Amino acid sequence: MKRGFLDGWNAAQGITTSESFQAFTIFGQTITEPIYNIFAIVGVSGLLMYIFAQDKAMDEFIMRLRLEAVHLTFILSALFIFAVLIFEVRWTVSAMGVIEYQVILFLIINKIKKLSALPKEEMGYE
């Protein structure tokens, strides 16, 4: 088995390597690591295309909502990572997983901000 630089470095420092990917089954189909990686890349690519898509009525207000959603996503992600570091939680996740979680968190926050910014129903002045 060919080992990379980090595997050799970690072994020299006495750091154990992470567990290897274990295939799993969904609806009778076995998902192996290459298939999982392809699904992850396609999923993140689709979410990024959605994030950077232009709205029909792109104006400063929509841009401000997106910027606030990005800021809130960054703050929540940083707080979560700091909490994991402070409490020394044994949490293993790939970098791709962190990106996926951040993109999904952004989409949720952005949708909530858009829904909360919608004008209320009109009072019916006649």
Image (cartoon, rainbow, N blue to C red):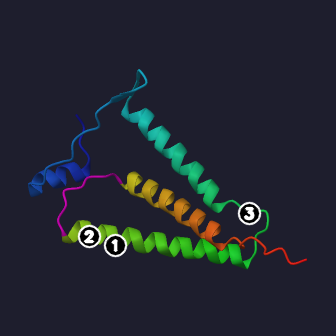
Q: Is there CB contact under 8 Å for labels 1 and 2?
A: yes
Badge 3 crowding class, 10 Å Cα cut-off, few under 14, some 14 to 19, many 20 or more, is few
Q: Earlier in the sequence, mark 3 or mark 2?
A: 3
Toward the viewer: 2 or 104?
104
Q: CA distance from mark 3 to mark 2?
A: 35 Å
Q: How many marks?
A: 3
What residue span does the magenta drawing correspond to?
87-94
Q: Is residue 65 left or right of residue 103?
A: right
Identity, as a three-letter code, of the amino acid under mark 2: Ala
Q: Residue furthest top?
A: 28
Whole-percent x, y for residue 32 in the image: 37, 30
Q: What residue is shown with label 1?
A: 79
Identity, as a three-letter code, of the amino acid under mark 3: Asp
Q: Secondary structure at mark 3?
A: loop
Which mark, by number, is residue 36? none
Which mark, by number, is residue 83? 2
Whole-percent x, y for residue 50 in the image: 63, 55
Q: Is residue 12 left or right of residue 118?
A: left
Residue 91 higher or lower than 3, as above or below: below
Residue 92 higher or lower than 126, as above or below: above
Q: What residue is shown with label 3?
A: 55
